[in-house]
Amino acid sequence: MRTRAAVALEAGKPLEVMEVNLEGPKAGEVLVEIKATGICHTDEFTLSGADPEGMFPAILGHEGAGVVVEVGEGVTSLKPGDHVIPLYTPECRECDYCLNPKTNLCQKIRSTQGAGVMPDGTSRFSMLDGTPILHYMGCSTFANHTVLPEIALAKVREDAPFDKICYIGCGVTTGIGAVINTAKVEIGSTAIVFGLGGIGLNVIQGLRMAGADQIVGVDLNPGKVEMATKFGMTDFVNPKDVEGDMVAHLVELTGGGADYTFDATGNVGVMRTALEAAHKGWGESIIIGVAPAGAEISTRPFQLVTGRSWRGTAFGGASGRTDVPKIVDWYMQGKIEIDPMITHKLSIDDINKGFDLMHAGESIRAVVEF
Ligand code: NAD
Ligand code: AHE
Ligand code: ZN
Ligand code: ZN
């Protein structure tokens, strides 16, 4: 079939919206009509050329929601008409990783996913002249139709609006999950969140749900304060306004350092500040942000010797097929909020405006509706 997609032809160039060929689902695969997709900073990271795994031409996008159109041979858990959210972290429920409760990082298809192809080693997308186009994070939601492995789809309730629940495909789950699944924040905790964008705001929302007492937000953009306060931020720090040492400032503000700190910027200097602003003896710092190729973190080992822990999280530690339908239920029950964070709605023809809004710091989430 043919479908419409925004194609990343090369790093650092705007996406090009065009008709592409899409082959039907092979064994174990599912054809999905994408109804809506968010634009996450990770899409921008890969498009910029900073992603060591980035390859072109590719169809980016990993924060989608849609409807099953057709299933390949052997697919048993989904049928045409089912509403689904694509999962860049699949859940096969049988690999060593899925069987270990300490991780959500299913590895069943990780190598082919990282290479931009389906598990059989080939792409389903191509240009009209036959040139193959790579998949991205196993999802490629910047296409009106896409093909995914069955294990990379969460079936969700049919009354949930696509233009909101697409965000659960990455940002909402990553932020809330980092608090609940990874850090396991306790009632009464103190926390610092670095980066008040699409992920950081969901960390704040998760911290409020977990019953944190103090939630400090840190961002260079004061335009993020209003939204962060609405979601539960109790104190705001703009590093530009801090005279002297940022770590010392945060340690004083939190009465000795925070129980939990979260990096949602992808900046390795910020990650160091986050680690060092965690409380001596027990503070945990969770890295969520994705750093560019070649970037490395550093600190004095003494910071860890004296009881701080440095950890990381992907997709908020969530096991997608199990957890994502529950998070959709939380949204429908009003336990979590999504709507205010979707600041812009675009058509696929205007998808590059979504990247412009992100660069300008004007959006939290821009959502493309097909
Ligand atoms: P975003 O662009 O919406 O937000 C980033 C925020 O960080 C912005 O508000 C920006 O002003 C702020 N910021 C940037 N540099 C800063 C600095 N030096 N100090 C303070 N604040 C700073 O991005 P997002 O969609 O929220 O994504 C945030 C990060 O999380 C990205 O690196 C993204 O790739 C990553 N991410 C990781 C996962 C995961 O599973 N680990 C999932 C989704 C996104
Ligand atoms: N390809 C990059 C790493 C990108 C990365 O860390 N991705 C996160 C999800 S970000 C979603 O917005 C992730 O899930 N990582 C685990 C994994 O297996 O990719 C690089 O540096 O090579
Ligand atoms: Zn993402
Ligand atoms: Zn698995």
Image (cartoon, grey):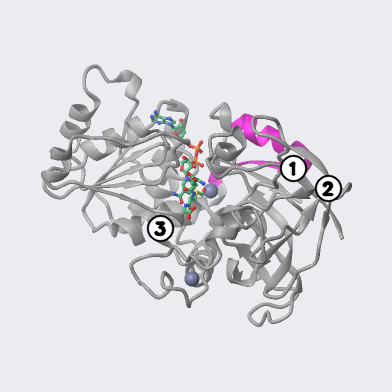
Quick one: SS at disc 3?
A: helix
Q: Say above or below: 189 vs 300.
A: below
- Please report the residue visible at 53 percent of the width from the left and 44 percent of the height from the top: 341
Q: Which mark is residue 7?
A: 1
Q: Which residue is mark 3?
A: 177
Circle 3 or circle 1, nearest the eye: 1
Q: Is residue 367 above or below residue 99?
A: above
Q: Name the disc covering residue 127, or none.
A: 2
Badge 3 amino acid:
Gly
Q: Position of residue 119 (x, y in %)?
A: 63, 65
Cβ atoms under marks 2 and 1 closer than 8 Å:
yes
Q: Nearer the viewer, mark 3 or mark 2?
A: 2
Residue nearer the viewer, 234 or 103: 103
Query: Crowdedness of circle 1 by 10 Å Cα count: few (<14), some, many (20+)?
Result: many
Q: CA distance from mark 3 to mark 1?
A: 30 Å
- Location of the N terminus by quadrant is bottom right
Examine the rendered structure and indicate whether residue 78 appears above or below residue 245. Answer: below
